[in-house]
Amino acid sequence: LIGLLNNLLLHAKSARAMRDAKGIDHVVEVLNVAFSLEVESLQEDCVSCLLRVLQEDETAGPVLVNIDVLPLLAGLLDSGNEEIQIRTCGIVTRTCAQVPSARCALHELDATAKLLPLLTSSSEEVQEAAANALQEVRER
């Protein structure tokens, strides 16, 4: 179901509709369950979905901050799964760009310390995503 939703979000209009229908809230609920049960494939689908929403709807960031997803994102940065790392860094980057106050919350969650080791990942894509996220988190 999350994969299907991800495909629907290829259009900005669908992303806005998802935000308005509280769809983001539901994806975050599923992500919380997937995180607590350590179901990586579902985590990957959920972070892909959230990133796509942020890419297509520039007003989705405040929704994520308001439903307090930042602690969950900080936890996902510790994942050993490169795709989850890349997408979570993308979510952090876009959320900070859309909601500057998210930077303070991420500092309190020690996100910078979680992003720094990703700069030495064997994956250049992870390195780039982490560098972008660090730049956005540290920008003031």
Image (cartoon, rainbow, N blue to C red):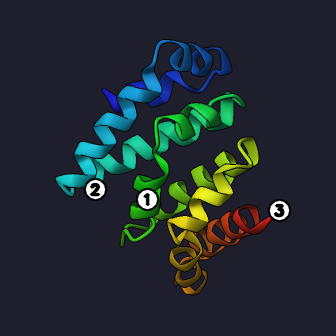
Badge 3 density bin: few <14, some 14–19, many ≥20, Cα 10 Å: few
Residue 2: image location, x then y, percent: 35, 31
Q: Secondary structure at mark 3?
A: loop
Position of the N terminus, as image quadrant, is top left
To which residue does mark 1 refer? 84
User: Is the residue 16 above or below the residue 118 in the image?
Assistant: above
Q: Residues within 10 Å of mark 2 (few under 14, many from 20)?
A: some
Q: Which residue is mark 2?
A: 40
Q: Residue furthest left?
A: 37
Foreground tag (3 vs 1): 3
Q: Where, by quadrant of the figure, is residue 40 drawn?
A: bottom left
- Between the residue at mark 1 and the residue at mark 2, the CA separation in whole angstroms equals 8 Å
Q: Earlier in the sequence, mark 1 or mark 2?
A: 2
- Amino acid type of the residue that numbered disc 2 sits on in the rendered structure: Glu
Amino acid at circle 1? Ile
Amino acid found under the numbered disc labelled 3: Arg
Q: Position of residue 132 (x, y in %)?
A: 72, 65
The one nearer the camera, 122 or 118, is: 118
Q: Secondary structure at mark 2?
A: helix
| CB within 8 Å, label 1 to label 2 | yes
Q: Quadrant of the C terminus?
A: bottom right
Residue extending farthest right: 140
Q: Cβ–Cβ below 8 Å for labels 3 and 2? A: no
Q: Residue at x 73, y 41 (%)?
A: 98
Mark linked to residue 139: none
Name the foreground residue: 65 vs 23: 65
Q: Which residue is mark 3?
A: 140
Residue shown at the point (74%, 61%) measured from the top left: 136
Q: Secondary structure at mark 1?
A: helix
